[in-house]
Image (cartoon, coloured by chain):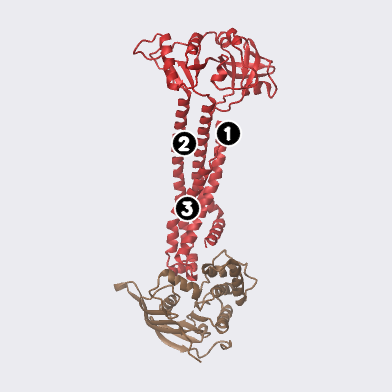
Chain colours: A red, B brown
Amino acid sequence: MILQAVRLALRSILRNKLRSFLTILGVVIGVAAVIAMVTVGQGSSAQVSASVESLGSNMLVIRPGQRGFGPPSSGVPIRRFSLRDADAVATLPIAAAVAPVANATATLVAGNANVSTSITGTNEQYLTVANWTLALGRNMTAAEVRAGAPVCILGQTVRQKLFGTGDPVGQAVRVKTISCQVAGVLAPKGAGSFGQDQDDLVLMPIRLVQRRLNGDDDVNGIQVSLAPGVSAQEGTRAIQALMRERRHIGLGEDDDFSVTDMKEVASMLNSVNSVLSRRMSSIAAISLLVGGIGIMNIMLVSVTERTREIGIRLAIGASSRQVLTQFLVEAVVLSLFGGVIGIFAGLALAWGAGAFMNIPFTPDPLVILMAFVFSAVVGVVFGFFPARRAARMDPIEALRHQ
Amino acid sequence: MTAPAPLIELRNVSRVYGRGEAEVRALDGVDLTIAEGEFVAIMGPSGSGKSTAMNIIGCLDRPTGGEYLFKNTPVQDLSNDALALLRRHYLGFVFQGFNLLPRTSALENVELPLIYKGVPAAERTARAQEALAKVGLSGRGAHHPSELSGGQQQRVAIARALAGNPAVILADEPTGNLDTHRSEEILILLQDLNAREGITIVMVTHEPDIAAYARRLVIFTDGRITRDEPVAWNQTGAEAPA
């Protein structure tokens, strides 16, 4: 009986292709929106989690100025760090590895190719601290760092832009007036928490960057990898005590530097992310409701149009339940059509958006199943009223209907 | 020869629409017994209650007074679903306007009652083909109603009524939309079904020469039966029942 009803429903849907399509458009859009939102949301969560992994274990970042992502707050003047600060942190027992960082932006030239990238001046411990591995060549040596020797390590993106798939190790790269020898190439990490390309960088000895590119001896930040068994809290406290002493900050005065646990930042990002995608999905779900009302509307029209047919069926021996089933199944089939089209549209949308925003495409079977079930539920809920109207018709009246 | 069992028994049946001032007594104390194998024509002017009687006999409506026994079962107190079951298993309808489903092939139209009976697909098709053959339309199963003439459409409707193997075919002005020649064809078909298959036929009409094809004539006036007699002058020479 149900199978028969499904066949009947399919036929009546296909008979009015355009109308059926317009009817389900609301459900298509609703389901597509929910699927796209959830998939993109989950993709970016997955990305944040992945980038937490890539940050390395127990990494703290010390920056001058007060904590916060925005512009430095007024009141407390920013005092820069120097390499001596990094050396001092390195003497703390809580630190396993310490890497001072000085940032610059410059254009690299190799042969005919050139690329504008961000340059990270640091020391030989940076690879350990920031959890990088080498794909080719070698790390910079402590001696090279101390001397500020003209060597560099290329990120994958930079390597590709300058050398393609060729081996750049030992080749010369020109940065402003410096001719730099490529010592190694980093293994790729992929996109970061904000969708940025983490592989678009070049590492150089910090003194080289300070003297030849920035013309100062500022250290923008110090990254610390904590010793095994040391918690982020302990590490933060030890660093704060040391830096307050070094910077002569009296009791009751605020820190003029910040210590950030990168994992904490990542998990915060993650929760913002999930709240955001949940909100957006619930907004998208409203369009599913609107879609359901569209189905109800057309089903009501259809029941009225087919009054005579209903009369014939009742006269021939259909019970009111069979008529109810027929129209209910038709609404559900319509709605499921909408759901399936919506699922594919939503996945396509998520894939496109993901490619555009550098977010991995991670479709969730559970979410897809839920969208499918939910569109069936929409069909039942919004199809019931029109179907009941059909089932309650008086056969004599219905047969007389023109 | 024993008397044929009564199939349809109306006992003092009345059907009242509306209440108080607006009360209309469409049927007013009707007694009518129709036995198995009869071919009855019901005549009467419009408003005489013949259609109301037909609806009640067809289990589409219930009497407001009196008793209706179908196969000795009182029908007036049955639920809507029980009435639907009676229609499904014992009754076949033929309407003036044919009432075929549009954009649906003749074969599928004929299969319709079998679907509700739960007959499996293969058997359904076979039985529908058989019914179409009985009305002389074998090979037309794939045609849609719009591709058939009025007479052919009414034959499809008769085939649909036949397919469910009914005890009674109720025909409400079956020739009302047809010309004389087609009308005769349909009436001869009905006579034939009555004679060969032993199907009881109750036919409503308002034309005496149509009623003449039946073997018994019942005339309604103002909600009552005013005449009930055998048809003296039977049209055409369909063989007598075996």
Q: Choose between A290 and B90: the one closer to the eye.
A: B90
Q: Amino acid at mark 3?
A: Gly
Q: Is residue A130 above or below residue B190?
A: above
Give, as a three-letter code, the residue at label 1: Ala
Mark 3 = which residue? A379
Mark 1 highlights which residue? A355
Of the numbered discs 3 and 2, the one sitting upstream in the chain is 2
Report x, y in % for residue B187: 55, 81
Residue A136, horizontal then vertical, whole percent: 66, 21
Q: Chain of mark 2?
A: A
Mark 1–mark 3 Cα distance, whole angstroms, equals 33 Å
Q: Do badges 1 and 3 share one subunit?
A: yes
**Which residue carries the number 2 mark?**
A277
Question: In whole angstroms, how far apart are the C-alphas of marks 3 and 2?
Answer: 26 Å
Q: Residues within 10 Å of mark 1 (few under 14, many from 20)?
A: few
Residue lying at 41% horizontally and 13% vertically, measured from the top left = A241
Q: Amino acid at mark 2?
A: Ser
Is residue A110 in view from this perspective? yes
Contact (Cβ within 8 Å) of mark 1 with mark 2: no
| Mark 3 and mark 2 on one chain | yes
Res. A257 visible in picture: no
Q: Is residue B51 left or right of residue B108?
A: left
- Whether label 1 touches label 3, CB < 8 Å: no
Tell me the tag on residue B66. Answer: none
> First in sequence: mark 1 or mark 2?
2
